[in-house]
Amino acid sequence: MTAIADPRTPVAPRRKGGPNLEKWGWLYMRASGVLLVVLIFGHLFVNLMLGEGIHGIDFAFVAGKFATPFWQWWDVLMLWLALIHGANGMRTIVNDYVTHNGTRRVMIWALWIAAAFLIVLGTLVVFTFDPCIGLTDQSADWLQELCS
C-alpha cells in the first residue's frame, strides 16, 4: 500500500518577538472561511434562486448588479477574502512540503504576487465596469435605453 508522506516541518530559527504571523494567518483562515460561506451562499441564492434563476443570468443581469454599490462591494469582498484565503492555504502547503529554503521563498513570493495581481485586476473590473463601452446601433434595445 502506498501512503502519502508526512509533511515535513522546515527548520526555522526561533522567533525573536514581534507579531506572530502564523497565529494571525490561522485566525484569518477561520474568520475568512466563515465570512466566505455567508458571502458565497448569498451570492448563489441571489443569482440562482431569485428571479428567473440561472436562465436570468446574462449580460444585463451582471450590468445591473455591477451598477449597484452594494453588489460591487459584496463581490469585491468575496474576491479579496477568497484570494487571500487561498493564497494563505497554498503558503501553508508550500511550507509543509518544500524543503529547500530558496525554493520555498520563491514559491511563496510567487503566490502572493499572483494573488495581489488578481485582486487588483478583479477590483478594477468590478469598479470600472461600463456596459456602454463599444455600444453600436445594432446593440440590444435594453442596452441602448440603459446607456442613453
Image (tube, rainbow, N blue to C red):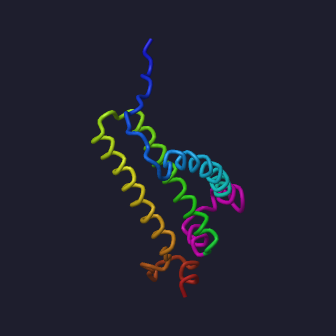
Residue extending furthest toward the front = 16
Residue depicted at x 64% and y 71%: 70
Find the magenta span and give its range: 45-67
Q: Position of residue 78 (x, y in %)?
A: 57, 58
Compared to 87, does 141 lie above or below?
below
Judging depth in this view, the residue of 53 and 92 nearest the camera is: 92
Compared to 144, does 125 lie above or below?
above
Q: Position of residue 4 (x, y in %)?
A: 44, 22
Q: Residue 2's quadrant in the figure?
A: top left
* Quarter of the image where the C terminus is located: bottom right
- How many callouts does the rendering have? 0
Residue depicted at x 33% and y 41%: 104
The answer to whether 63 appears left or right of 51 in the picture is: left
* Quarter of the image where the N terminus is located: top left
Q: Position of residue 53 (x, y in %)?
A: 67, 57
Residue extending furthest toward the left = 102
Judging depth in this view, the residue of 125 and 58 nearest the camera is: 125
Compared to 44, does 127 lie above or below?
below
Predominant SS of the magenta segment: helix
Residue depicted at x 71% and y 55%: 49
Residue extending furthest toward the top = 1
Residue 140 within the segment the image draws in magenta: no
Residue 63 within the segment the image draws in magenta: yes
The answer to whether 13 appears left or right of 60 in the picture is: left
Residue extending furthest toward the right = 50
Judging depth in this view, the residue of 53 and 126 nearest the camera is: 126
Judging depth in this view, the residue of 102 and 121 nearest the camera is: 102
Q: Position of residue 97 (x, y in %)?
A: 39, 33
Compared to 20, does 145 lie above or below?
below
